[in-house]
């Protein structure tokens, strides 16, 4: 398996030592064997000051490569610690899209200074890229594309390739454009290699052509490329002119990032906390949903207090509150998770709204029946009271049905009114199911025990 | 934005009508404008019988392309409904790796018949592929690779490309091998295009070479390719001989599938249910964890019953049980989610075990302090009882600490002993935190109210 680890990692202690000594030559020697991605990981695991020291120790190109691989938060933290000169030196070696990412992460004052240090064409390109929304096709695309005119030959296309400097990215596809710069076709490199010299590129174009607008959300860009197995997706402006390309590696990052974001949102957090170091700021990200959950718990308690009378008569009812809440919480999470994930991966596109809700209701009812029977048996054996068993069992069945319907319908509803379902569902659904479950349980108890309270 | 939808979708009603009429010509006409991926989505949204009818209506190549894009479960369901002849006809048009996927999904009896229908070299290749583990590099790789010997020239490499038929995949990289078939280098196509005819390939090789063993788990394959932005990863056997390549589109599927699996596991389900139609079988997948949660809830209830004495004296204590459980549940889910996700994306590789646990403890303590203060104020205002406020507040603080430590350490512990943390954490952590939270809360109440019970 040694072929999977292309370079042996230097020891953490040695790196620590070189950092403490402030010895750039030793650092450079230690990091020489690492890929840019590994250096970025290292920087993310140390303090921003140490990260800045590592980048300063590396030379321009190496520092630039590592900087480009940092997560957004880590990039911001490290850049704050670096001098404008070191940043400019690294940025000058970068492809325009990476340069735009770094410059976008700078403070206002640093940004102006670093932009001034770029040569004019690079500066214009970067300024234009900075205008696109961060999470759009324009924000993640590379503006460097190889284009040939529609009436060119295979030989012309190859000449274009020869003239090109591609320090960072491989070229897989040549794009064919018309006289106005509008995209008319894609020409995979392997077709070009095997074509006769004088073959017109118009005859080599591969159909169908899939492209996207510069404003398209990055999640949709990723879905499109994953769906059609595209190594690169050409990006066009409102007039159909080719302005860049999104490559498969950008999309891999987007898919991984979006999955992280969905997972964290469903847990009532956000990817904003991933590279965050301050416990206070992480708590700030998570607190809103924890407080929603707390408020829900207190509301459930308030409802319980409304049933004090029956609780005083049958204190045992209180002992099933955690089980009712747990069942509602788990079923709700399962239903909402499966629906949200199907929405994210586009698996619900053909199936409408009612199918998933009905599917979940049937599953929730089945689970409610099984758990209701189990819990009712426990209640009966524990209290030797048929009424208690009946109340607990029916409550579980009811909770199974209501939790699955709420869990599956709420994400669909939120999506319809334009709210990202992953943001609001996790803790919210658990809370809603907690409150409803308790209400249902004690209402059933009141009815079945023939008692009315307060 | 119309450029993002390469073909207009036929109406669902028209397709339904053609299916009900059993009219293959009409079906074929309706589906002609769809990509294979869109046909696959359609098949997944109808019954297996209808899916089989759609595939039979399409011609061999089109049926094969759509079949290859189906999810595992949908593929099995549809294949059960198809005749061996239709399957063979579709499989003959497929690349070896897709053919192996289809044949692997067949029943024993169908498998032999379909394998017999293949020509000998294809049959051998597919049989070999079927031997690799489904979730390994061997299981997802394409065996078709373009190779040139180490002592060849650029012109030889181009001649290899010309001779190649690549119906399904683009070729981006040519691999350089030695006399024993061992992989020695990668040669991106754009270098080949721009090279002089007689340049030796040994001089064109791009360093560093990243490859993987045929047994490597697909999740690690995906991490490797995402990390090093590889469009294709060469796969070697135990002797270092090149046996295939994994391409970026396989990896995009793996990343998306693994994210789905992680998300569903954390909710106490599994991706086995995604294409499942029977409510009973879905319930079977989810029930184990729901029952764990139920058992935890009942255990919490049992502990509550041990504190009946104090509950009879201060019934109000029961009203805070849902809030204590909600706080522990939410904090535990957040801590475990962030740790599991960091483990999946490889972000914890440099940071050891204690750092994430301490980080979560600090966050949990902060959240516990805020929520404890809030809940204590509510308790005091509600019951005008300082002791009640103190018990509730301190319990919340304690739950914040314990839930965050359990949530962050359990996934790390499970990973260390070789269990996938996503499988066992979601409902398990919630349950553990429920039980512990209740115990902590009532123990505090007993101590502070100076009472001993049972």
Image: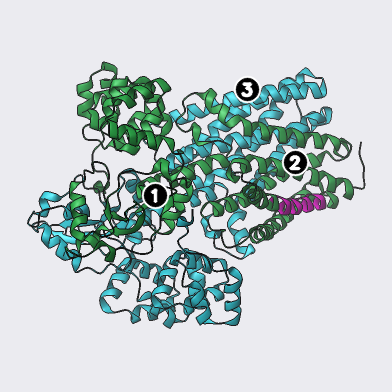
Chain colours: A green, B cyan
| Magenta stretch in the rendered image | A389-403
> Residue at label 2?
A435
Label pair 2/1, CB-CB below 8 angstroms: no
> Residue at label 1?
A235
Secondary structure state at the residue bearing disc 1: strand
The x and y percentages for residue A229 are: 38, 58
Name which residue lies at 42% across and 83% down: B85
| Gap in angstroms between the C-alphas marked 3 and 2 | 24 Å
> Residue at label 3?
B369
Name which residue lies at 44% across and 65% down: B69
Q: Quadrant of residue A324?
A: top right
Secondary structure state at the residue bearing disc 3: helix
Seen in the image, is B305 located left or right of residue A23? right
Name which residue lies at 42% across and 33% down: A72
Seen in the image, is B163 located left or right of residue B275? left
Viewer-closest of A344 and A102: A102
Please check whether the numbered discs 1 and 3 fall on a single chain: no
Label pair 3/2, CB-CB below 8 angstroms: no
Viewer-closest of A63 and A32: A63
Secondary structure state at the residue bearing disc 2: helix
Mark 2 against mark 1, which lies toward the viewer? 1
């Amino acid at each position: 398996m040694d072929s999977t680890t292309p370079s042996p990692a230097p020891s953490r202690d040695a790196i620590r030592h070189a950092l403490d000594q402030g010895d750039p030559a030793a650092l450079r020697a230690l990091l020489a064997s690492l890929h840019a991605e590994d250096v970025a990981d290292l920087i993310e695991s140390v303090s921003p000051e140490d990260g800045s020291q590592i980048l300063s120790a590396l030379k321009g190109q190496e520092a630039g490569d590592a900087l480009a691989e940092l997560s957004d938060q880590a990039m911001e933290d490290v850049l704050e610690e670096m001098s404008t000169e070191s940043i400019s030196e690294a940025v000058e070696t970068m492809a325009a899209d990476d340069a735009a990412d770094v410059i976008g992460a700078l403070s206002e004052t640093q940004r102006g200074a670093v932009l001034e240090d770029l040569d004019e064409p690079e500066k214009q390109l970067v300024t234009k890229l900075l205008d696109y929304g961060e999470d759009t096709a324009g924000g993640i695309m590379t503006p460097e594309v190889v284009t040939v005119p529609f009436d060119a030959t295979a030989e012309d296309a190859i000449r274009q390739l020869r003239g090109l400097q591609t320090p960072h990215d491989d070229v897989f596809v040549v794009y064919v454009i018309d006289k106005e710069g509008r995209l008319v076709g894609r020409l995979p490199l392997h077709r070009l290699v095997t074509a006769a010299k004088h073959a017109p590129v118009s005859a080599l174009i591969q159909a169908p052509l899939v492209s996207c607008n510069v404003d398209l959300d990055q999640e949709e860009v990723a879905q499109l490329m994953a769906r059609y197995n595209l190594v690169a997706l050409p990006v066009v402006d409102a007039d159909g002119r080719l302005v860049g390309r999104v490559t498969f590696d950008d999309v891999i990052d987007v898919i991984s990032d979006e999955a992280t974001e969905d997972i964290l949102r469903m847990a009532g957090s956000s990817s904003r906390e991933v590279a965050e170091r301050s416990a206070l700021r992480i708590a700030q990200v998570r607190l809103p949903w924890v407080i929603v959950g707390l408020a829900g718990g207190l509301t459930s308690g308030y409802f319980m207090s409304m049933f004090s009378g029956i609780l005083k008569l049958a204190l045992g009812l209180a002992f099933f509150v955690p089980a009712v809440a747990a069942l509602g919480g788990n079923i709700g999470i399962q239903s909402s998770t499966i629906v949200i994930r199907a929405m994210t991966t586009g698996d619900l596109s053909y199936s409408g709204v009612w199918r998933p809700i009905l599917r979940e209701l049937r599953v929730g009812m089945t689970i409610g029946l099984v758990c209701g029977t189990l819990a009712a048996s426990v209640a009966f054996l524990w209290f030797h009271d048929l009424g208690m068993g009946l109340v607990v069992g029916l409550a579980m069945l009811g909770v199974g049905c209501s939790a699955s319907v709420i869990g599956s319908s709420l994400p669909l509803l939120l999506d319809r009114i334009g709210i990202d379902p992953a943001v609001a569902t996790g803790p919210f659904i658990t809370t809603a199911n907690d409150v409803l479950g308790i209400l249902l349980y004690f209402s059933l108890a009141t009815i079945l025990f023939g008692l009315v309270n307060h």
